[in-house]
Amino acid sequence: MAEEKRRRRKAKVLPAKEEMVAGPAGEGDPAPNEGAQSCGFIALIGAPNVGKSTLVNALVGSKVAIVSHKVQTTRSLLRGIATAGRSQLIFIDTPGIFAPRRRLDRAMVTSAWAGAHDADLVGVILDAKRGIDADASAVLDKLAGVRQPKILLVNKVDLVEKFLLLEIARDANKHMAFAATFMISALTGDGVADVKNWLSNHVPEGPWHYPVDQITDAPLRQLAAEITREKVYLRLHQELPYQSTVETDQWQERKDGSIRIEQTVYVERASQRKIVLGKDGRTIKAIGADARREIADMIEAPVHLFLFVKVRESWSDDRDRYRAMGLEFPKE
């Protein structure tokens, strides 16, 4: 996408201090201005629920992407940043690729493929438990149109017999010749270090785009909204359709160092609002408590979080909502 290409042309991106999420640099990490550097964008793509967000978090070494068992939890491109030796690796967590039916579906799938086409390398993730099913086959077939080098990541290997893993890897490589194949478990961390090491040796030479201690380029307001959306999904996994969204309306730094945050959870029907609120408001209070704790840990400051639930019919057809999520609004 145009925005991604502009970002890659910059030698360094320095967001405002309050908009940056940082993590501690490893003891062995070199200063970013010492010696030859490498820097590259790696798009992680695959069918829904194959573990892309979990893998991004494992590669970065800190939580930057929300995770739930609900399909299409990831809606737009999110970047997690890691260092490995003299290489900076920028991982692009993309929405799951599936056969879209609605406008929002089409926007997410388009965003995922755009991320793959704009990256330097592409990591294709397969769920070892599901093997090469119809969704995985569709992704592999369409990869022929992506010119970037590709690696295969067979995830959740701790749940499958070894001989089945070898069959999956062999069948996937029949679709195309992957530059490398890895057997990993994003949840336990098995094999993740090998992936990170391989990528550090294959991203192009060039200056780092971000400071050494930055782990994502997403604004804090966006990350806070994503954390709350994750808690909504985890609390209401079966009861609420994924067509709900969360927006941060206010972010106020108070004199005592605490942060006052106001967010709105938008749903499409009044019946869904009742579900999110729960009896006597118990559900939304529990969601708020979980989100407040995680947001406070993220920004390392006390948080006063106020949640509101509103009905916005057909919000998934609202052009402004797509812009807020970082998605392009499909014409049809």
Image: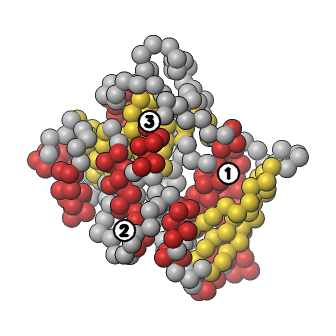
Q: Earlier in the sequence, mark 3 or mark 2?
A: 3
Mark 1 residue crowding within 10 angstroms, few (<14) / some (14–19) / many (20+):
many
In contact (CB < 8 Å): disc 3 and disc 2: no
Residue placed at 45% from the left, 25% from the top?
207
| Circle on res. 106 | 2
Examine the rendered structure and indicate whether residue 221 appears above or below residue 310: above
**Marks 1 and 3: in contact by CB < 8 Å?**
no
Examine the rendered structure and indicate whether residue 107 appears above or below residue 124: below
What secondary structure is marked by label 2? helix
Few, some or many C-alpha atoms within 10 Å of disc 3 (few <14, some 14-19, many ≥20)?
few
Instruction: State the residue lying farthest toward the top.
Output: 35
CA gap, disc 3 and disc 1 = 32 Å
Callout 2, which amino acid? Arg
**What colour-coding does the image apply?**
secondary structure
Residue at mark 3: 9
In the depicted view, which residue is nearer to us: 36 or 128?
A: 36
